[in-house]
Image (cartoon, rainbow, N blue to C red):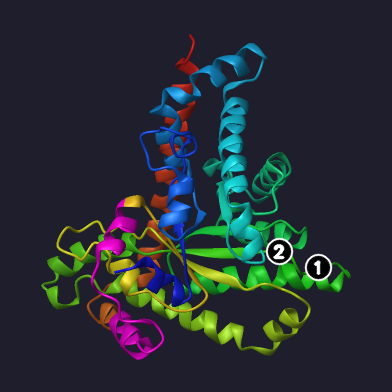
Amino acid sequence: MSLSKISNAGVSIWLDDLSRERLVTGGRARHLSDLISKSHVVGVTTNPAIFSSSISGSALYREDIIRFRKAGLDTEEIITQLTCSDVKNACELFRKTYEMSEGVDGRVSIEVDPRFARDTASTVKQARALWNKVDMPNLLIKIPATKEGLPAIRQLIGEGISVNVTIIFSVSRYKEVLESYISGLTDRATSGLPTSGIHSVASFFVSRVDTEIDPQLKALKSEAMLGKSAIANARLAYQHFSDIRNSPIWRELERNGAALQRPLWASTGVKDPNYDPAMYVNELIAPHTVNTMPEATLEAATASQTFKGNTITSNYFESEEILSNLGKVGIDIEKVADKLEEEGIDKFIKPWLSLISAVEKVGH
């Protein structure tokens, strides 16, 4: 299947990976410019685990680490320099995409320290610092959608900082995220500040939902429901997005130049080998969405012969039924989401701490 079909259906294809290997000629990974020109990639997302793998596993950072250390920077300052440098260079590569899409795509994300996930003030402070350091209009600052992250989202949007809200696992939390975005824009409008030029995506995690629920379904002898929960959950998030998009409050903001906060399907790499490796791409196609894919998923989508057009908007009733049936067998999607949020934060903190340790050892 041509990736152009996905793009033409209104899905922005972003790569869920960034490394210096992708930014230098002759690197082991496919060059980012090659993915832009040949694979319809129009944006990049990163996370602490990706940066940890990138920096810890490549000799390309060694000279910079030693140079920064000699200049007196501590380990975390060095990591900030390295990550911001890669993100800034990626932003440059996407500048044309950004301009041609009028700011919708060509976006590159950088995440606040995952240890701040429960700390609103520290999240806001570091988000401002990263925004100013990278200093590129197509940057997105990733903020976790924790209870403490929600006021940070509103604050940062109100200050004109574009945000990628991450670690969303439930429709109820997604509703709060969208509300925080709208509140931030409303704060700006009320203060007489422009709402145009600010962009945001809401990263709704997919595969981890099935990874958590499927074993429970097997234990309950409910095999007929396997592999359906995550897609149903995401489709109902899109239903809410559509409802808000057609609401009076949004239409008023849109008249004043505000941009949609698009749903972004994250964690789209299939974990179960029994499933179609492009499942979380093919089954989540609809206008005004983003799908951020690891390269293996990008390749699977390229090779897939399945393309059914819009696979979301005609499946709301079925999706509601799937989540209702989960409740009937004793699986509470809200409890699942709470658990996955905690695990998601932990899965980013651990590699971040490993990265700190790895950088400390360089040159010593």
Q: Is residue 30 inside the magenta stretch?
A: no
User: In the visual, does 293 lie left or right of 45?
Assistant: left
Q: How many marks?
A: 2
Residue 188: mark: 1
Q: What segment is highlighted magenta in the picture? A: 296-324
Residue nearest the viewer, comparing 138 with 77 = 138
User: In the visual, does 89 lie left or right of 346?
Assistant: right
Residue corresponding to mark 2 = 198
State whether residue 70 is above or below residue 163.
above
Of labels 1 and 2, earlier in sequence is 1
Residue nearest the viewer, comparing 286 with 166 = 286
Which residue is depicted at the point 77% across and 69% down?
A: 195
The answer to whether any part of residue 357 appears in the image is no
- Three-letter code for the amino acid on which mark 2 is drawn: Ile
Residue nearest the viewer, comparing 329 with 17 = 17
Residue 82, given in percent of the width and then of the height, sits at: 57, 31
Nearer the camera: disc 1 or disc 2: 2
State which quadrant residue 85 falls in: top right
Residue nearest the viewer, comparing 71 with 228 = 71
